[in-house]
Amino acid sequence: MNLWQASAAELTAGYARGDFSPREALDAVLARIEAVNPKLNAIVTFDIEGARRAADASTARWRSGTTLGDSRWRSTHREGQHPGARYARHLGHARLRRLRA
């Protein structure tokens, strides 16, 4: 599998199994960008070092089993439900209340 083509679900599963790391996924994406961006000129500003720091931090979290994120996202997970579904519904209801007011 080309990591630059992997979906978020495939990446997450691979990280959890230890098949590859976020840093390896980032390196694959950066290599792909380097290969195609000269023709496309789609990306003009890079923070490669910042991305590498973030990928290394993510790799360390995956290896240690810790998480990063807002507890609203983690605590809303139900079987068969996207983790952000309840939060997204809450935001939708809040917008609806503002529109009705």
Image: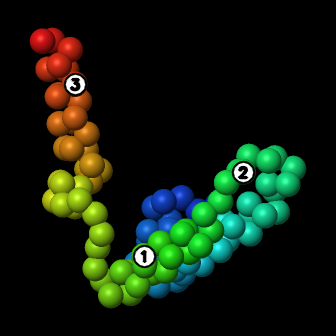
Measured in 3D between alpha carbons, the distance from the residue under mark 1 to the one under mark 2, in whole angstroms, is 25 Å
The residue carrying mark 1 is 58
Q: Position of residue 14 (x, y in %)?
A: 49, 75
Q: Amino acid at mark 1?
A: Ser
Q: Which mark is residue 44?
A: 2
Residue visible at 23% across and 30% down? 92
Q: Position of residue 49 (x, y in %)?
A: 59, 73
Q: Is residue 41 left or right of residue 58?
A: right
Q: Which mark is residue 15?
A: none
Q: Earlier in the sequence, mark 3 or mark 2?
A: 2
* Viewer-closest of 44 and 37: 44
The residue carrying mark 3 is 95
Q: Is residue 3 visible?
A: no
Q: Is residue 1 left or right of residue 98?
A: right
Callout 2: few (<14), some (14-19), or many (20+) C-alpha neighbours within 10 Å?
Answer: few
**Mark 3 residue element:** helix
**Is the C-beta separation of discs 3 and 2 under 8 Å?**
no
Q: Quadrant of the C terminus?
A: top left
